[in-house]
């Protein structure tokens, strides 16, 4: 299968690989796995008092498309409000990276990781976890 140039770019030069302090109150951590292939993704956000995401990091043990999806997701997350981050749809990632149908679940993993990081942040700060409808 041919990867798009954008996938190869993010795969060979992933943005924002790393770890934020999981214990910090203003950090949300999402850890998700894809049942289709067993790949695992961790995505973290750092949020300021105005509910704006000031930093995002990821670590993905997975295929090139999953790495590219999470790398792109962290780029998109920085500077967004929590509400804007919740609106990121996996199909936006699919479109931007030109992922083929067989790789759609890799982008679903990234969307799930964003939402799970937001929920971790919410629960840590005394808010209720949001119901997260499965996007697929
Ligand atoms: Fe692949 Fe849902 S199983 S998108
Ligand atoms: Fe499973 Fe990409 S093949 S995340």
Image (spheres, grey):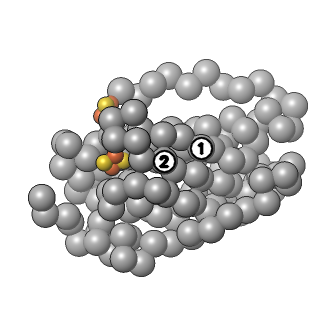
Cβ at disc 2 under 8 Å from ligand 2? no
Q: Earlier in the sequence, mark 1 or mark 2?
A: 1
Residue 129 percent across, percent down from the top left: 71, 26
Residue 60 in view of the camera: yes
**Furthest-bottom residue in this view:** 13
Q: CA distance from mark 1 to mark 2?
A: 7 Å
Please determine whether, in this image, residue 17 is positioned above or below residue 121.
below
> Which residue is located at x 78 percent, y 53 percent?
22
**Residue under pointer 2:** 40
> Which residue is located at x 28 percent, y 72 percent?
8
Residue 89, label in figure: none
Residue 114 percent across, percent down from the top left: 56, 45
Residue 79 in view of the camera: no
Please tell me how many numbered marks the rendered image carries: 2
Question: What SS does tag 1 mark?
Answer: strand
**Label 2 Cα crowd, 10 Å radius (few <14 / some 14-19 / many 20+):** many
> Which residue is located at x 18 percent, y 49 percent?
100
Q: Are marks 1 and 2 in contact (CB under 8 Å)?
A: yes
**Furthest-front residue in this view:** 38
Residue 49 percent across, percent down from the top left: 85, 53
**Residue under pointer 1:** 31
Residue 85 percent across, percent down from the top left: 58, 46
């Amino acid at each position: 299968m041919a990867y798009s140039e954008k996938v190869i770019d993010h795969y060979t030069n992933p943005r924002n690989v790393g770890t934020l302090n999981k214990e910090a109150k203003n950090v949300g951590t999402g850890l998700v796995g894809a049942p289709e292939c067993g790949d695992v993704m961790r995505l973290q956000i750092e949020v300021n008092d105005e509910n704006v995401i000031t930093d995002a990091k990821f670590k993905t043990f997975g295929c090139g498309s999953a790495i590219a999806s999470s790398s792109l997701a962290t780029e998109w997350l920085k500077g967004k409000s929590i509400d804007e981050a919740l609106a990121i749809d996996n199909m936006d990632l699919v479109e931007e990276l030109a992922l083929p149908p067989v790789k759609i679940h890799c982008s679903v993993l990234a969307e799930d990781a964003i939402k799970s990081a937001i929920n971790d942040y919410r629960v840590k700060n005394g808010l209720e976890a949001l119901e997260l409808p499965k996007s697929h």
